[in-house]
Amino acid sequence: MSTRIAFIGLGHMGGPMAANLAKAGYAVTGFDVVPAANESARHNGVEIAATAGAAAAGAAVVITMLQTGRQVLDVFSGTGGDGLLAAAAPGTLFLECSTIAVDDAKQAHAAAEAAGHRCLDAPVSGGVVGAVAGTLTFMVGGAAADFDEAEPILQVMGKRIVHCGGAGAGQAAKVCNNMILGVSMIAVCEAFVLGEKLGLEHQTLFDVASAASGQCWALTTNCPVPGPVPASPANRDYQPGFAGALMAKDLGLALEALAATGVSAELGSRAAEIYRRFADEGGADRDFSAIINQIRDRSGS
Ligand code: NAD
């Protein structure tokens, strides 16, 4: 396969994603500011460049998997003349996979287009497990022709690839989905704590709610109490899974989107506060379902 792919950001997600592309036969040139991330990627078949710009030079596709919108915009425009947009050949396809604000994603699209390139926002869900297994879900925003070109590459890293609309639509879908997830996990945890106080067995509440109108992913896949769903993080002392810090971050992005659009989302806003507090009070590295312990503490349980 001749397509050369630059991969910038070889962390928990980017490392295994780049490794899967290399395993599938793509020529992958990567770069991360952390030497250990570069070393680990090199072991997985990724050639390492000296700078982000050097990785992008000569690539047909540039993938970014960074932490924040600020990092993405900085790496695109570059400091010291080594920006990705300036280094890439005209017409390069940028796949921006980080989870960032919708407005930042639109800025990234605009900057890429102004530099003569093409851009898709393509955030993911599925976590590190999905990144390693190549089973991520990609939510993609941008032009249909660019989506068609990117799809075979995304298929290597994911199993569900959804074109959500124009620039920023992938991030929009991600932020809406995760706002549902944050609110629904809190609701499921509150119901279990109420059930405990009312004398209900966990399994009994699970059997009823999972087959009734309370059914949702937070209950049936990521069940916050041990027992009913053996694979859920509650059964391994809340090792993530999906870490509290990431839920707090994603709900922070939801708050930005709510402010920008003027939408009144009382539960989404409250969920953002609750998860910020959870992350600050020791939950950052625990699975986000461990919020049930805070609810118990506040309930005198
Ligand atoms: P991470 O911190 O492990 O990886 C990000 C990498 O980017 C780091 O290795 C960092 O050194 C590198 N980096 C930062 N600035 C750089 C620069 N200027 N040039 C090159 N590299 C640079 O984070 P992650 O867990 O891999 O997450 C990446 C993105 O995916 C985030 O936006 C996150 O919200 C999102 N996400 C994460 C998960 C998850 O479960 N970890 C799930 C879905 C989405």
Image: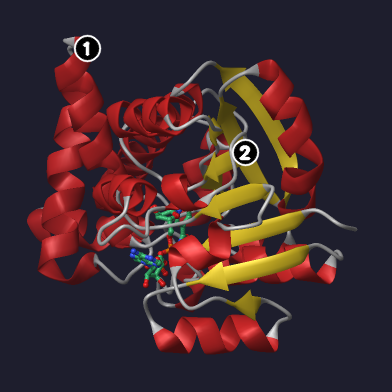
Q: Residue at left 27%, top 43%?
A: 190
> Picture quarter containing residue 208?
top right
State the colouring used for the structure image: secondary structure
Q: Where is residue 235 in the image (x, y as percent from the top left)?
A: 50, 72
Q: Looking at numbered disc 2 in the image, what kind of residue is underneath it?
A: Leu
Judged from the image, the quadrant occupied by ligand 1 is bottom left
Q: Residue at left 29%, top 26%?
A: 103
- The CA distance from mark 1 to mark 2 is 29 Å
> Picture quarter containing residue 269?
top left
Q: Looking at numbered disc 1 in the image, what kind of residue is underneath it?
A: Thr
Q: Position of residue 203 (x, y in %)?
A: 53, 54
Residue highlighted by disc 2: 93
Residue highlighted by disc 1: 261
**Between residues 193 and 113, which one lies in front from this camera angle?**
113
**Between residues 288 and 129, which one lies in front from this camera angle?**
129
Left-right relation of 144 to 235: right
Q: Residue at left 33%, top 69%?
A: 286
